[in-house]
Amino acid sequence: DIICAVNIQHNCLDSQCTDIQQQPVHQEWIETSRTKATVKHKSTPNFFLNVYSVHNYAHIQRVVPDTLR
């Protein structure tokens, strides 16, 4: 059963995501000749968890280890 939803964000700083790659820009379904710089994220378990989400706080607090509080 799903109890609640949580918001997590990838932690680029601790994961050392520094590689930049150029991605083509799409307009509608068509690829244009323009590009934009994007971060190439490294696959790591480092995430930020929004533990102060007011409506889910009681559920989130139960699963967050004491070492992370």
Image (cartoon, rainbow, N blue to C red):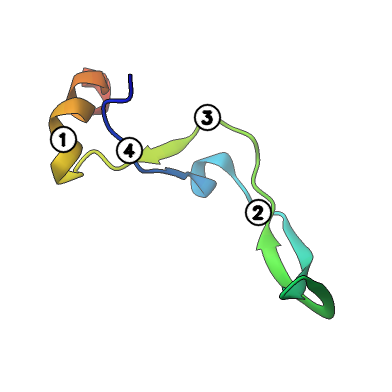
State which quadrant residue 28 falls in: bottom right
**Helix or strand or loop: what does disc 2 sit on?**
loop
Q: Residue at x 52, y 29 (%)?
A: 45
Q: Are marks 4 and 3 in contact (CB under 8 Å)?
A: no
Amino acid type, mark 2: Thr
Amino acid type, mark 3: Pro
Q: Distance between the Cα atoms at labels 2 and 4? A: 26 Å
**Helix or strand or loop: what does disc 3 sit on?**
loop
Q: Which residue is mark 3?
A: 45
State which quadrant residue 20 falls in: bottom right
Could you tell which of marks 2 and 4 lies nearer the N-terminus? 4
Amino acid type, mark 1: Tyr
Could you tell which of marks 4 and 3 lies nearer the N-terminus? 4
Q: Report the front residue among 47 and 56.
A: 56
Q: Distance between the Cα atoms at labels 3 and 2? A: 16 Å
For disc 1, the neighbor class at 10 Å (few under 14, some 14 to 19, many from 20) is: some
Please state which of the two labelled residues, at mark 3 or mark 2, is closer to the viewer: 3
**Helix or strand or loop: what does disc 4 sit on?**
loop
Q: How many marks?
A: 4
For disc 4, the neighbor class at 10 Å (few under 14, some 14 to 19, many from 20) is: few
